Image: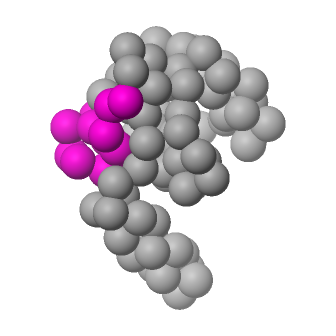
């Protein structure tokens, strides 16, 4: 999979999982593998968590913990709507 697509899928999956509860960096690599995003390193996940935080889609609650923001919830709704038309 092309890296640009993979990074977007990682970000979307992080937001989707954050809807269910807080994210902890050390617990996400297996989740990504189960979603078919193979060879996803913890560093890649950390970079995407930081990216989502910088966009105000996630807020940081601890050194390695994040939760979804209202803006993140809205982003998921918009992406889901676009995917339904795909």
- Horizontal relation, residue 42 to residue 61: left or right: right
Which residue is depicted at the point 42% across and 34% down? Answer: 66
Residue 27 lies in quadrant: top right
- Location of residue 74 (image quadrant): bottom left
Where residue 34 appears, x then y in whole percent? 79, 36
Instruction: Identify the image quadrant of residue 76.
Output: bottom left
Q: Is residue 59 magenta?
A: yes
Question: Left of 28 or right of it: where is 35?
Answer: right
**17, 45: nearer the viewer:** 17
Q: Position of residue 43 (x, y in %)?
A: 46, 13
Q: Which residues are magenta?
A: 51-61
Nearer-the-camera pick, 34 or 59: 59
At horizontal 23% and vertical 48% (from top left) the residue drawn is: 56
Residue at the farthest right position? 34
Give percent across and percent down for residue 42. Answer: 54, 14
| Left or right of 41, for residue 33 | right
**Residue occupying the point 72% across, 33% down:** 31
Residue 55 rendering spot, x and y as whole percentages: 21, 46
Image quadrant containing the C terminus: bottom right
């Amino acid at each position: 999979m092309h890296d640009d697509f993979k990074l977007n899928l990682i970000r979307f999956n992080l937001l989707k999982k954050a809807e269910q509860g807080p994210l902890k960096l050390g617990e996400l690599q297996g989740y990504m593998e189960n979603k078919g995003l193979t060879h996803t390193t913890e560093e890649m996940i950390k970079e995407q968590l930081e990216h989502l935080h910088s966009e105000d889609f996630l807020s940081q609650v601890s050194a390695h913990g994040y939760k979804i923001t209202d803006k993140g919830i809205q982003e998921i709704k918009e992406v889901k709507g676009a995917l339904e038309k795909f």
